[in-house]
Image (cartoon, grey):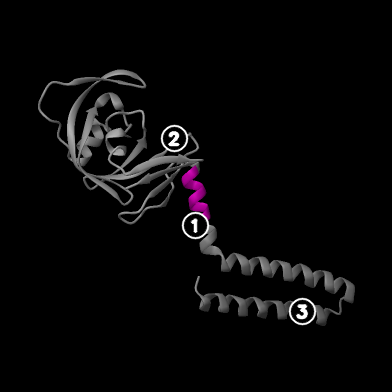
C-alpha cells in the first residue's frame, strides 16, 4: 500500500473517531464510562489502521505459510543468474524445488543420494525429452531396482542456476517423482545444508 492510500485511510479513521466522540458528547454519558468506551474505539481503529497499512505484508506471510504447509519449495534467494540459491526444508524433511526443464516447469526433489537426475515418463513427455537409443539400464533406487532409459536435457535451470546437456534417467517406475541428483549437484561450485536450509552455489 502506498503512502497516499495510507493517508486516505488515516483521515477516514480519524473522521469516524471524531463522530464517535461527538456521539458520546451528545448522549452525555458519564466521563468515566465515556473514557472506557473511547479507549475501546481507539484500539479498534488502531487495529483497523494497522491491518490496512500492513495488508500486503499479511498477504505475503499467508502465502508463505500456505506454501510451506503444502510442502512446496520456498526459495529465499537466487532468483538472479550467478547467485547462490537457498531452499527451505519442507515439512516432510526434504528439499523440493520447482525447476525449469527445457522450458517446462517441473517439481523436483533434491537428493544427493541419487547418482543421476531422474524424471518420470510423464515429465519427459511434457518437456519434449526423447530417450536415447540403446538398451535400458538397471539402477538401484530407494524403492528397489528399476529399469530406466537414458536421455539428455538441453537445459535444466534451478533458480538462477542453469546447466546444459544434463544426463537423465527416464522411467515409468518413478511414478510422478522427479529427482535432481549428483550429476547436477557436482557441477556446482559447492552446496551445503545449514540448519533447515539447503544452499546451492553456482
The residue where tag 3 is placed is 21
Label the magenta part by its dominant secondary structure: helix
* Image: 49 above or below 127: below
* Residue 85 drawn in magenta: no
Residue at the spot 71% in from the left edge and 80% down from the top edge: 19
* Residue 63 drawn in magenta: yes
Label 1, label 2: how far apart the Cα atoms are: 23 Å
The residue where tag 2 is placed is 94
Q: In the depicted view, which residue is nearer to us: 182 or 5?
A: 182
* Magenta region: 61-68
Q: Is residue 98 left or right of residue 62?
A: left
Q: In the depicted view, which residue is nearer to us: 133 or 27?
A: 133
- Going from N to C along the chain, the mark reached first, 1 or 3, is 3
Label 2, label 3: how far apart the Cα atoms are: 56 Å
- Circle 3 SS class: helix
Number of residues whose C-alpha sits closer than 10 Å to that of mark 2, classed few (under 14), some (14–19) or many (20 or more): some
Q: Visible in this render: residue 181?
A: no
Q: Quadrant of residue 108?
A: top left
**In x, y percent, where is residue 21?**
77, 79
- Circle 1 SS class: helix
The residue where tag 1 is placed is 60
Disc number for residue 137: none
Residue at the spot 87% in from the left edge and 76% down from the top edge: 29
Q: Is residue 8 left or right of residue 169?
A: right
- Going from N to C along the chain, the mark reached first, 1 or 2, is 1
* Image: 125 above or below 44: above
**In x, y percent, where is residue 155?**
21, 45
Amino acid at each position: 500500500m502506498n503512502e497516499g492510500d495510507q493517508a486516505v485511510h488515516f483521515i477516514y479513521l480519524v473522521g469516524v473517531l471524531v463522530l464517535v466522540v461527538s456521539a458520546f458528547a451528545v448522549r452525555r454519558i458519564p466521563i468515566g464510562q465515556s473514557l472506557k468506551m473511547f479507549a475501546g474505539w481507539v484500539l479498534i481503529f488502531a487495529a483497523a489502521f494497522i491491518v490496512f497499512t500492513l495488508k500486503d505484508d499479511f498477504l505475503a506471510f499467508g502465502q508463505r505459510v500456505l506454501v510451506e504447509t503444502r510442502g512446496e519449495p520456498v526459495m529465499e534467494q537466487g532468483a538472479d543468474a550467478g547467485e547462490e540459491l537457498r531452499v527451505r526444508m519442507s515439512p516432510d524433511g526434504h528439499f523440493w524445488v520447482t525447476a525449469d526443464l527445457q522450458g517446462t516447469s517441473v517439481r523436483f526433489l533434491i537428493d544427493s543420494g541419487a547418482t543421476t537426475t531422474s524424471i518420470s515418463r510423464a515429465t519427459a513427455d511434457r518437456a519434449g525429452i526423447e530417450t536415447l537409443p540403446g538398451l535400458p539400464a538397471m539402477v538401484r533406487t530407494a524403492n528397489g531396482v528399476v529399469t530406466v532409459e537414458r536421455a539428455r536435457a538441453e537445459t535444466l535451470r534451478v533458480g538462477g542456476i542453469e546447466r546444459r546437456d544434463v544426463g537423465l534417467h527416464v522411467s515409468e517406475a518413478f511414478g510422478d517423482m522427479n529427482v535432481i541428483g549428483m550429476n547436477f549437484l557436482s557441477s556446482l561450485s559447492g552446496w551445503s545444508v545449514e540448519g533447515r536450509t539447503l544452499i546451492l552455489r553456482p
